[in-house]
Amino acid sequence: MITAAPTIKHEEMIEVDLPKEHIIASVAEDREATCWACGLRLLLPSGGLIFKCGWCGAITNQSARKQEDKSLKWRWLRDRGFVCVLLVFILFVICGGVWAVYPVIFSISQFCGIFHSTITVVLAVATISSFSVAAFRSPGTPPNVLWGSYPVVEKGDLENYTFCHYCSKPKSPRTHHCRSCGMCVLDMDHHCPFIGNCVGAGNHKHFILFLISAIVSTIYVSIMAVYSVLHMWPPLSVHELGRLNGSGSRFGWRLSKEIVHAVLRSATLLSIRGFILIYLFISSFSVQIGLIVLLCQQLWYIYEGKTYLSHLSSQGDDGEKDCQNLLRFFGCPSVSFSRHLPIFRSSRKRHEK
């Protein structure tokens, strides 16, 4: 990247009074360019397409152009479809779990039934509310800054800012334009089609809370589904267990085969409620594995002071690995023992919301 100092023509020297250190003479082999942020003319070496203004600090990429996007409507429909599917699945897990589990729980005792119902309501409200906020809250927009002319833009006002050709406005560092949402997102982590929204500075915390509540809910559903199925599973009928003989691996194979056949025969006697519980266990267990992996990845990036996009680019190389990043992300006050938490590399704070 080229850092260019501004230059002004002779007839413009009367109107604009710049310090002498920002005025350089024209060179024959250099060419003139204009900074999009402050409007000053810059002298560039021939062939330079990306340069940084020596006055305001803005970065200009002359090769960047707005591209026609014809798939925006398709991505919008895709995201809304994912949101509908996820909402239906959440409601199915909640309603199906309550319907399938409550006879077994209430048959134990009324206290167990009331306790289960209370836990179910709390987890359902926490999951749906955090999902709704993450899906429908603005992910965060970059700050509005003055730009366009030298008297308005002072020295260093737009340090490392770039220009978004889609939004036609300045784009601050760690801000990315999402072509699915059609907007610039501040501190963008990624675009999540399952919530139909970007994950950025405005809703990142709610997205993490949604992952946590969804994981706790699926774990609870898995435990209650297994507990209820074991109570209503028909007794196993092993017909040939007494006639099994032999030793070693052959006997173990025949015993395992007979037990599997007994389980399958008893499964045919299960009611619809039992099959729904089995499906709830399989679906919730598989979903919680994916959510746990995603949550661990997100928490690790926050611990490093990065986002997913900054991790992919060179912007995340100077992040600070510090447990205080997690405390600051969730809005927890600084505590005395935080100074003893591990800090592997000191650098500029990166994940301030």
Image: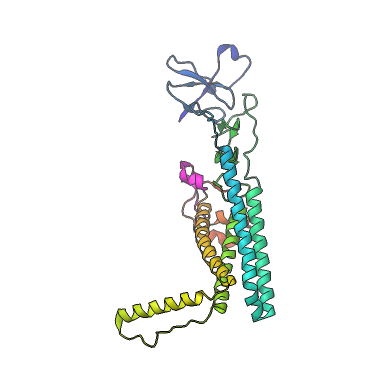
Where does the image place residue 19, in percent across and percent down from the top left?
57, 22
Q: Residue furthest top?
A: 11
User: For the view shown, which residue lies furthest in the bottom direction?
Assistant: 242
Q: Nearer the viewer, residue 295 or 68?
A: 68
Which residue is found at the position 53% from the left and 58% from the top? 291
Q: Residue at x 60, y 63 (%)?
A: 93
Q: Quadrant of residue 99?
A: bottom right
Is 141 in the magenta? Answer: no
Residue 248 visible in the current orientation? yes
- Res. 209 in view: no
For the point 46% across and 42% down, the residue is: 313
Q: Residue at x 67, y 61 (%)?
A: 125
- What's drawn in magenta, residue-wise? 307-322
- Tally of numbered discs: 0
Q: In the image, is residue 41 above or below residue 113?
A: above
72 to 15, vertically: above or below:
below
* Residue closest to the eye, 342 or 275: 275
Q: Is residue 22 above or below residue 294?
A: above
> Residue 126 vs residue 25: left or right?
right
Where's the N terminus, which quadrant? top left
- Image coordinates for residue 343, horizontal then vertical, percent: 49, 56
Colouring method of the image: rainbow
Name the side, left or right, on which 317 lies relative to 273: left
Q: Residue 208 or 259: which is nearer the viewer? A: 259
Tell me the chief SS of the magenta region.
helix
Task: Point out residue 136 in the picture as x, y percentages from the top left corner.
Answer: 66, 48
What percent of the width, then of the height, locates residue 212?
A: 58, 60
Question: Is 319 contained in the magenta span?
Answer: yes
